[in-house]
Amino acid sequence: MLRSLRYGEADRILHLYTRDRGRVGAIAKGVRRARSRFGGRLEPFFRLDIELHEGRSELMTVTGAQTRDGYAAMRADGAALDAASRSCDAVLRLFDTGEGHADVFNLLCNRLALLAAPSPADRACASAREGELAFRLKLMHAAGLAPQLAACATCGEREHLVGFSGAAGGVVCAACEAGSFPIDEQACSFMVAALGSALRDVPRGEARHLAQAERAISVTLEHHANVRLIAAAA
């Protein structure tokens, strides 16, 4: 579950992300009552087997739910919980359609599992800025918005890549740098490595280069998808 909102006296509106139908909106009636049969499982960041009734309303109605994974360790770790919130928000903003995308579903489940790792050190690594940026880059790849990093996005030049252009969708050379911002080679290398590695193997990066990578992600999404994400962890 990506998000839930209080509705009326005892209900909740749920934003769900499913393997087969993408984003789904649903209402859980009476879930906030003390004796609700759903207990506390209809909360954000639970992985559920959920039963839905589809009527005439845009919102489906929750008729049953079983917990697949509650990611308990994550819920006792403030940094991990905050990272999970930003990750789910990114999915909600980038994939706000009723079209299924199994790769995104699996990526999100993997991300939450890493944030709920038994070891505090593993959770800290997953919730660090590197892990968050790697997750966003992989979401961009799934959406067909991954930045061009191997050659100038304007002319194809493979050397003297000095800037990043959101409009062009990637790095640009010195001859095409108008309208771009400066980017270091190390920031580009981080993004390349993050796209090519598993989430649990994301490389470390210096704050300066991570800030440049985050800016590259932000300007690309704002220009090509009209999406603005919450700032990543510092």
Image (cartoon, rainbow, N blue to C red):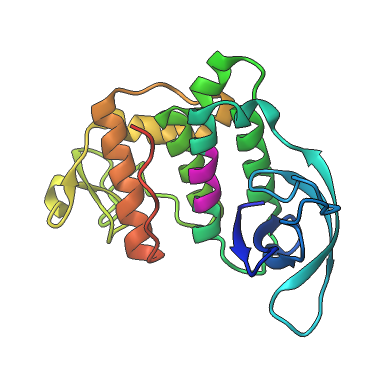
Rendered residue at 70%/74% (across/down)? 59
Residue 88 spot, x, y in % from top left = 56, 48
Within the image, what quadrant is residue 28 found in?
bottom right
Residue 26 horizontal/vertical position (percent): 71, 67
Q: Which of 71 and 186 is in front in this view?
A: 71
- Please indicate whether residue 233 sits to the left or right of residue 138 in the image: left
| Residue found 38% across the figure and 35% down from its top | 233
Name the residue located 13 percent from the left edge and 51 percent from the top edge: 175
Q: Is residue 212 magenta?
A: no
User: Is residue 7 in view?
Assistant: yes
- Residue 138 visible in rendering: no
List x then y, in percent, for residue 214: 33, 41
Image quadrant in which you'd find residue 23: bottom right
Vertical placement of residue 178 versus 56, above or below: above
Magenta region, residue range: 84-89
Would you say 193 lies left or right of 5 here? left
Seen from the viewer's position, the closer of residues 120 and 102 is: 120
